[in-house]
Structures are given as C-alpha cells and as structure tokens.
Image (cartoon, rainbow, N blue to C red):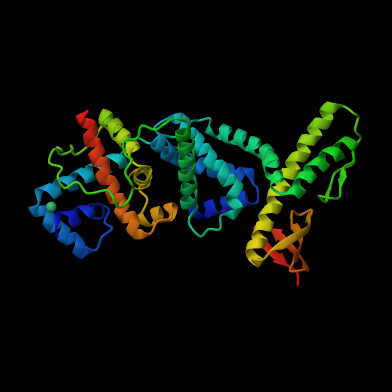
Amino acid sequence: MDCKTVKEQLSQLIDSEISETEALEIMKHLKTCSECKRVYDDLLTLRNSLINSRREDAPPYFMVNVKEALKKEKKRGLLLRFPVNGKGLSVVAALFIIGFMGIYYMQDLNIQHEPEAVNGNLRVFMEQEEQRKEIATDMDSEVVYYIDKLKEMVNKDLEVLKTKIEEDGTIVLEVSVDGVVTVYYGKDGELWKIE
Amino acid sequence: MVQKDENALIEGAKKGGEEEFEALVLMYQDICYNISYKYFLNHEDALDATQDAFIKVYKNIKKFRGDSSFKTWLFRIVMNSCKDISRKRKSRIQPESIFKEGEEGEFTLEIEDKALSPLDTVIKGEESGKLMKSLNKLHEDHKEILILRDINDLSYEEIGSILSLNEVTVKSRINRARLKLREVYFEEEGT
Ligand SMILES: [Zn+2]
C-alpha cells in the first residue's frame, strides 16, 4: 500500500469504518512509515479534541424566543401564504369585508362563528379580526397540507372545488380529477375517500 | 422507553399539540444549539439558526413520516438553517475565506508536509479555541461533516442520511475534512 492510499483511509481506520483486512494492511504500513504514522496520530488527536470540546447549551430564554417566533410566524403565515393562489387573496379580502359588515357566517370557508353583537367599537373589531386571522391561518396550512398530499397521491392535475373542516377536525376536500368529482377526507396525516 | 416517549411527542406535535412540540424543543434544543454554535462560533447566529430550525420543525412536522429517525430529520433542518443564515450573512459581507478551492476532486493530498510538527496528544483550553477557529475556517462541506462526525459523534450512516450523501462520499469527505483541518490548524500556528 502506498502513502497516498493509506492517507486516504486514515479516518476510516480511526472511526472503525473499514474492513479488517484493510485495517491490518494500513497498520502494517504505519509501523514502517513514520510520515503516515504522524498524520494518523494528528488526525486522532484532532478527532479526540473535537469530541471533547465544550458543549454550548441553548440560553435559558430559548423556549420563550421560540414561542414568540411561532406567534409571529402564525400571523405572517396568513400574509405570505394567501398570495400564492389568486383565490386565496379574495378570501382575505372577503374576510375583511365580512368582518366590517359584522356577518359571522362565512359560507366560503365553511366556518361558523357564534353570532355576536358588534358594538361598532374598532378595538373589539380588531381583536376579533386578529382571532379570525389565526383561525384562517391554521386552517389554511392544514388544508394546504392535505391538498399537497392528495396531489402527490393521485399524481394528476386536480381542481379543488370545496374545502371544509368538520367539528372533529377532519378536512373535507371536494376535488375534480379528470372531470370526476370526488370527496376526500383528511385527518391525523391520513387521507382517504369513501367509495 | 425514550424512543416511545419521543414517538408519542411527535404524534402529538403532528396534531398541533403545542405542549408536545415544546417538549421536543426541550429535548433537543441544547444539542441543536451546539451544532449551530460550532458552525458559527457566535451566539447571535447560533440562536437565529436554532430558532429558525425549530420553527421549520413546527411547520413541517406533519410531513415527517418516520422514514429516518427524528434526530436525523431534525439535524438536517438545523444544518440547512445554518447554511441559509450563513448565505444571508455572506451576501451582505464579503467573506475573507482563504479556501476558495472546490470541495471534492481538485484537493490534492499534501504528502510533502514535513514542515508540520506533530500535535500534542491533547488540545486543551486556549488551544481548543484555536481548533474551533480552524474548524470554522474550513469549506462549508468540510465544516458541517466534522460538526456531525467529531462533535456530535454521529455514525457515517446517519451523516449520509442528514447530508444526502452516499457512503463512499461520506468516507472520503470526512477524511479530506480532517486532513484539511490539520493543515489549517498548523497554518494558524505559523501565524
Ligand atoms: Zn506512508
């Protein structure tokens, strides 16, 4: 075995990721070649030093940061996700218009809100709007997930006709594949249809 | 036991359970932070990268199908977050990287390295800081593979899965990375 081949396999020897025959051959070479032996010793030292290096733990406020970032993400998700499809944009617009009109039944999204009296106070409206955005965001990502999954499953162009979330969280997707309308159900990461 | 708990947490998080997600964060935050810290050698970027990674986990956990272990899946996300942030930083500041040569291929093994004196058997304290700086100066491909292998002690197979590399590439890249690290470490010594 020449020096080049030996040097190429030193790490495999250090990490025991090598066959016994090869290991024996390399070790035989190391006994006679001081040059390769020195490189081997150095690599071993570097490996041992790295593995013993001090671990840097996450700061104590890390979880608080993650939670804050998640909150922001949920809000941002609505703004980022909707413009992807043109239909979604109109849903956002509809949300605002519906909000202003004080109508709490949104047929488009199939979400039923408890009818409440709107006292015209802008602050109250803003808070409600904020809540509604979060509902829409959560729902949206959930629906998008199952649509993606369905596309992967049928591996064909499909048109989503209607989406709905049942009370138990089941996502209902009414889709048209090659002109055939089928209803799919999604829950807990699984997707199925009733024949 | 731990495995069973972890699976239950993953399933819970998939259903949107925030408590389960937070428990997963607690389980892995330190090891992920350590990976990011060793990647950047500064707390600010390490914090950003780790945080970004967990946000991605939250958003994508439903897509985790258990084809690989959760740890492998998570580490891949952490590594990608590190690279993303590194790229963003680089687009703002010109890097003063001294290693512009390509990763695989062109790199020639330094047979003539008689100028290098042998390393001590252990690198301690101050010296360990120098070692980390040397690691940080390596080409991204070399740095990340050594962080996974020599700092986190992952197997070649796990590394292959995290970096989407075949076994042969993992083997040769780890060796090249270590040889390069040795070279840089000694170069540091000379300056
Ligand atoms: Zn030799």
Q: Give the camera-side residue of B174 and B100.
A: B100
In screen coordinates, is B22 left or right of B155? right
Q: Position of residue A182 (x, y in %)?
A: 77, 67
Where residue B161 appears, x then y in whole percent? 43, 56
**Image label count:** 0
Q: Going by the picture, which residue comes out furthest to the bottom?
A: A195
Is residue B2 visible to us here? no
Q: Depth check: B118 or B191 in front? A: B191
Nearest to the observer: residue B68 or residue B172: B172
Q: Determine the residue positioned at 79% across, 55% down.
A: A164
> From the image, which quarter does the C terminus of chain B lie in?
top left
**Where B87 sits versus A169, above or below?**
above
Locate residue B44, reporting x and y percent.
47, 29
Please, is residue B149 above or below residue B166 in the view? Answer: above
Which one is in front, A159 or B135? Answer: A159
Answer whether residue A103 is visible to the viewer in this image: yes
To which quarter of the image does residue A81 belong?
top right
Direction from residue B72 to residue A89 in the image, left or right: right
- Residue A79, position in %: x, y? 70, 39
Q: In percent of the image, x 71 and y 53: which residue is there? A: A143
Residue drawn 74% across and 53% down?
A169
Q: Residue at x 7, y 54 (%)?
A: A32
